[in-house]
Image (cartoon, rainbow, N blue to C red):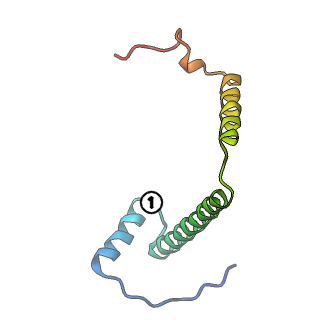
Amino acid sequence: MTRRTPIPTRLDDEEIAALDELVFAGLAANRAEAIRLSIARMRDALRRARVGDDIVSGYLALPQTKEDLAAARVSAEALLDAESWPEYEPSRVRAPG
């Protein structure tokens, strides 16, 4: 099992109420788990932001050309054309009401 280290901290009434709301809603088993899950979500958000920054940096370092964009559009349209979209066929679309 993972070793857990207690970290003393002070929370105000609003923060305690928020933790209790998360527990009451069933999003966490207890306050400690709510805090751990919050940390995990913040870490994931940071990781995703860093990946996004890396992607942007790559495009800035080597921008797409008009030819790249045209090829991407052709590929995307071919993929869409190859898909079946039965829910959007005129005979299956129902009028609201």
Quarter of the figure that contains the C terminus: top left
Q: Is residue 77 above or below residue 53?
A: above
Q: Above or below — where is 97 with respect to 15?
A: above
Q: x%, y% of residue 46?
A: 56, 69
Position in image of residue 93 (x %, y %): 49, 15
Residue in front for this viewpoint, 15 or 52 = 52
Q: Helix or strand or loop: what does disc 1 sit on?
A: loop
Q: Which residue is drawn at 55% across and 20% down?
A: 87
Query: Label 1 is placed on what type of residue?
Result: Gly
Q: Which residue lies furthest to the front in this view?
A: 66
Residue situated furthest left in the rendering: 13
Which image quadrant is residue 71 in?
top right
Left-right relation of 3 to 20: right
Residue 42, above or below 65: below
Considering every residue shown, the one lying at the far bottom of the view is: 8
Nearer to the camera, 28 or 14: 14
**Which residue corresponds to the image point at 52% horizontal and 11% vertical from the top-left?**
90
Residue closest to the eye, 40 or 4: 40
Instruction: Give the quarter of the figure containing the N terminus.
Output: bottom right
Q: Position of residue 67 (x, y in %)?
A: 70, 39
When asked about the image quadrant of residue 25, the answer is: bottom left
**Residue at figure coordinates x 45%, y 14% from the top left:** 94
Residue 33 lies, in percent from the top left, at 51, 72
Q: How crowded is mark 1: few (under 14 residues within 10 Å), some or many (20 or more)?
A: few
**Label total for image:** 1
Q: Mark 1 points at which residue?
A: 26
